[in-house]
Amino acid sequence: MATVQYELNRTHLAERNAYAASEKAILFDSSRCSGCKGCMVACKCWNMLPSPMELNSQEWNASLQCPYDLGPNTRLTITFRELDSTSPYRPVDWAIGRRACMHCTDAGCVNVCPTGALFHNEDGLVTYDASKCIGCSYCLGACPFDVPRHIGKDDLSGTAIRINKCTGCPDRVSHGMNPACVTTCQPGALQFGDRTEMVKIAEERAAALKAKGYENASVYGINEMGGTHVIYVLKYGLDGYELPANPSISWMTSASEIMKPVLGIGFIALVAGLGACLLSGIGYRRDELRYDEVNHDVIDVDTGDIVKHIDKEAGER
């Protein structure tokens, strides 16, 4: 019995390791999304992100989209956009989208982070170590999707000291589970798995939508930013959703990458100079002197030699 259980454990471990060995991706199929916002609730529950409970605490914006944007305690929000109807049988077309971290391969936030707080994990997803964040805000300007948000403030300076964004639930994925948002999606608009498989499913779905008359249906994320790890099936094409047509890393972010080696060399030179100063000072000790008030002599304490005689009337000699 113990042998059987041992073999089962080995099989489970091998399957889990194989599952985690390849790059993963979240697939969002906008044509299947009902806008229920269950994924938003699951994200907040799993990551313990609070929502304001006071009456009228949310600003009214005459939209089904609430919260309207990402925030310090909101990593994921569902977007709603009204489009001109493509059918005589309905007044409008609803383009329901998803706003969260895209987990880019060429991630500007990772490239520009000076402390390594943002990094790619073994699944290709962009996660972060909040304890390393210094609140420099570089990642906010480096992200072409306007995703990272500041959270928390320093008691003395009042400046934000860490960021918040979707991490891809690495604490779940590492144990063979799906991200929280994917787990709760009832209509199957969200899937999670190997990136190559998610891309294949997305392309097949976009082709099926085109065959049904949605001629602008497309896939987003295959090549954008070196390939994102959130793949979109866009039922109404790119114009119906809050996604940039040609996302790219800003020239300032690229410049910071070029400067990193230069700054690194400068830092090494600085450390080497300080080290040389330290070595040159080893063994050096300032002579300890005392003053003989009777004879007006300055005497070396260690040797007893008169270093200087002070003649009160004629001055020093």
Image (cartoon, helix red, strand yellow):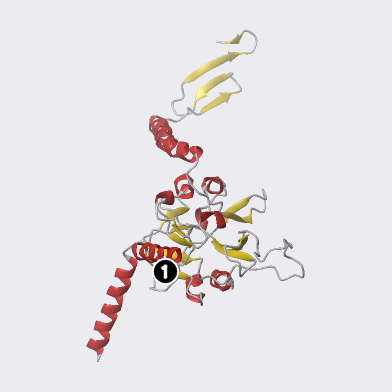
Within 10 Å of disc 1 (Cα), the crowding (few <14, some 14-19, many 20+) is many
- Of the pair 105 and 222, the residue shown nearer to us: 222
Q: Quadrant of residue 3?
A: bottom left
Please name the residue shown 47% across and 38% down the image. Answer: 256
Most extreme residue toward the front, as rendered?
88
> Is 170 situated left or right of 309 in this image?
left
**Front one among 82 and 87:** 87
Residue 15 position, x and y percent, is 29, 74
Vertical order, 29 against 289 (above or below): below
Q: Is residue 261 above or below residue 10?
A: above
278, above or below 242, in the image: above
Residue, x 58% and y 70% (percent of image)?
Answer: 35
Viewer-side residue, 231 vs 229: 231
On the image, which quarter does residue 53 sit in? bottom right
In which quarter of the view is residue 272 placed? top left
Task: Identify the amino acid type marked 1.
Answer: Phe
Give me the residue at 49% from left, 37% from top. 251
Compared with 237, 175 (above or below) is: below
Write the residue at 62% across / 7% down.
Answer: 314
Q: Is residue 3 left or right of residue 91?
A: left
Q: Is residue 200 shown to the viewer in this render?
A: yes
Estimate the x, y position of residue 182 in percent, counting from the top left.
Answer: 48, 71
Residue that carries the numbered disc 1 in the rendered image: 192
Query: In this view of the protein, which residue sits in the foreground, 100 or 188?
Result: 188
Give the image location of residue 59, x and y in percent. Answer: 73, 62
Is residue 241 something that shows in the picture?
A: no
Estimate the x, y position of residue 309 in percent, counting from the top left: 55, 15
Of the 4 image quadrants, the one containing the N terminus is bottom left
Q: Is residue 260 left or right of residue 20?
A: right
Q: Residue farthest to the bottom?
A: 1
Helix, strand or loop for disc 1: strand
